[in-house]
Image: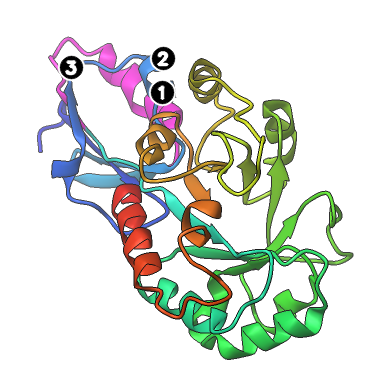
């Protein structure tokens, strides 16, 4: 590698490396403004003068290398592989418990579900304990609870989720935190202290009647450009296979689903959950 040639790769930081063939190649000089457009979910790998360097921000890369190289009289070539950011796929449980729920959740994890949010409002903790006991321990680290926060440590879960019923972080709590947001201003405020936040409703809700989208496509695109919607913001509300690509386009770090999955299953009588599994697979493929 000659000294006046800079080659840059970017990889997503929340999943396995993807082949550069899935990325977009850009050649030529990169401006400071162009660097700002890269998602914070990417790690930049720089090969220069026989050495490998890692940068978590396109702007820091720009400040370190581009300014000095740009002054050179030699022509520099920049190859940027901007790999597609893989979105998180999060499932929120049905609000009530049902027979064989543990088997369905386990099957969904086996098929690639990233994170499960255990949300059972106004239910006794003993039922959550029973459900968690029936789910294999290997999947506990992918479960976030919306209440009864003591379960996080007792079952070695992923973390806790804050909402209007449980808005406060427990005293001396350490670990993963997510929360619900219902405005872009709330996202700006709360994502600073959270690992990720839910923004809803992004589309018309499937599980709630007359709960319509709160944001226009233009508002979401503007919010992404302003850095409000990013990898720490999860889209919630009306997410299904027909609009998952839009969620990607708006720059969300993932999608949370509820009605789109559970509405395909009769919780009281259906014991054949193959359609549920098939639907999750479709969503997983889109998210990837």
The residue under the point 48% across, 52% down is 260
The CA distance from mark 2 to mark 1 is 7 Å
* Horizontal and vertical percent position of residue 39: 42, 34
Tag 1 residue: 37
The foreground one among 265 and 187 is 265
Q: Which residues are magenta?
A: 56-80
The CA distance from mark 1 to mark 3 is 16 Å
The residue under the point 56% across, 74% down is 141
- For residue 157, what is the image quadrant? bottom right
The residue under the point 15% across, 31% down is 3
Tag 2 residue: 33
Q: Are marks 3 and 2 in contact (CB under 8 Å)?
A: no
Front of the two marks 2 and 1: 1
Q: Are marks 1 and 3 in contact (CB under 8 Å)?
A: no
Q: Are marks 2 and 1 in contact (CB under 8 Å)?
A: yes
Tag 3 residue: 28
């Amino acid at each position: 590698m000659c000294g006046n040639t800079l080659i840059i790769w970017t990889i997503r930081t929340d999943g396995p490396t993807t082949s550069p063939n899935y990325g977009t190649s850009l050649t030529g000089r990169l401006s400071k403004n162009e660097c700002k457009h890269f998602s914070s979910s990417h790690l930049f790998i720089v090969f220069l003068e026989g050495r490998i360097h890692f940068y978590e921000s396109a702007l820091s890369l720009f400040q370190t290398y581009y300014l000095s190289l740009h002054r050179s009289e030699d022509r520099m070539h920049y190859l940027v592989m901007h790999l597609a950011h893989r979105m998180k796929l999060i499932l929120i449980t049905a609000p009530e418990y049902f027979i064989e729920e543990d088997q369905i959740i386990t099957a969904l994890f086996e098929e690639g579900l990233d994170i499960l949010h255990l949300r059972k409002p106004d239910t006794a903790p003993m039922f959550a304990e029973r459900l968690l006991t029936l789910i294999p321990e290997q999947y506990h680290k992918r479960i976030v609870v919306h209440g009864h926060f003591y379960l996080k440590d007792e079952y070695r879960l992923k973390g806790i989720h804050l909402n209007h019923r449980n808005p406060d972080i427990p005293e001396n709590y350490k670990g993963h935190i997510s929360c619900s947001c219902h405005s872009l201003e709330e996202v700006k405020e709360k994502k600073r202290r959270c690992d990720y936040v839910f923004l809803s409703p992004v589309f018309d809700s499937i599980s709630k009647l007359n709960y319509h989208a709160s944001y226009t496509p233009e508002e979401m695109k503007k919010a992404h450009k302003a850095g409000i919607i990013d990898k720490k913001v999860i889209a919630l509300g009306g997410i299904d296979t027909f609009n998952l690509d839009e969620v990607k386009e708006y720059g969300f770090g993932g999608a949370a689903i509820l009605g789109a999955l559970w509405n395909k299953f009769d919780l009281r009588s259906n014991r054949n959950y193959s359609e549920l599994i098939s639907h999750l697979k479709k969503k997983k493929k889109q998210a990837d």
